[in-house]
Image (tube, rainbow, N blue to C red):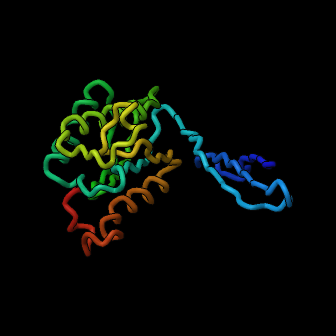
Amino acid sequence: AMYCGSFAPQSLAPDLAALICEFRLWRDPHYHEPIGFSVMLMARYRRSRVAGGTYFFTVVTERRQRVLVLPEVRAALRAAIESVRVTRPFEINGWVLLPDHLHAIWTLPPGDADFATRWRLIKSHVTRQCAFLFNPDLQTRNRAAKHCGTLWQHRYWEHLLRDEADLRQHLDYLHWNPVKHGLVQRVADWPWS
């Protein structure tokens, strides 16, 4: 016999991802004693979508590949951003590029809350331009079925900035990040911020 229950935590802040947790407990059919259990967490993302909002983003490479500061990747990323901004404008308030992830702060135009399409277009452009980085060891069945490359993680983290103080705090975090990760001693020494 197996007991199976599920619950969703109620105490999550509105801007955090909601989790669904499935708990399974297996019992020995002869002694009715628990003999094992498993817990499966699945993310159900709730995105804040505020037209004209200012957002902080974290975008990470698949399995933390340290490739984003390669000259070819930087050039492809710059070209992708410029291309996307022609048809889907946004203001860049801050940006830092680290070897395996980036942080960005964008302000979207009034009446527009579609940051997801912008990120999809940017990531797919860079993936196509940097096809030489395709790593078959990172290609899963799921990625192959979706015709995905192996450069980026599927998801990204986003936070709607609430006010000027929140913006300043995230700009400080963004610029301090290379120091935090031990890449430089001083903020001013990091060339891609």
Q: Residue furthest left?
A: 71
Viewer-proximal residue among 29 and 179 = 29
* Residue at figure coordinates x 30%, y 72% from the top left: 182
* Residue at figure coordinates x 34%, y 66% from the top left: 176
The percent position of residue 9, horizontal first and vertical second, equals: 71, 50
In this rendering, the answer to whether 36 lies above or below 147 is: below
Quarter holding residue 75 = top left
Viewer-proximal residue among 36 and 62 = 36
Viewer-proximal residue among 5 and 65 = 5
Viewer-proximal residue among 184 and 149 = 149
Q: Residue furthest bottom?
A: 185
Quarter holding residue 76 = top left
Quarter holding residue 26 = bottom right
In this rendering, the answer to whether 11 lies above or below 130 is: below
The percent position of residue 189, horizontal first and vertical second, equals: 20, 68
Rendered-image quadrant of the C terminus? bottom left
Q: Residue furthest right?
A: 31
The percent position of residue 102, horizontal first and vertical second, equals: 33, 52
* Residue at figure coordinates x 24%, y 52% from the top left: 68
Numbered circles on residues, count:
0
The percent position of residue 188, horizontal first and vertical second, equals: 23, 67
Tell me if 35 is positioned left or right of 93 in this view. right
* Residue at figure coordinates x 46%, y 48% from the top left: 157
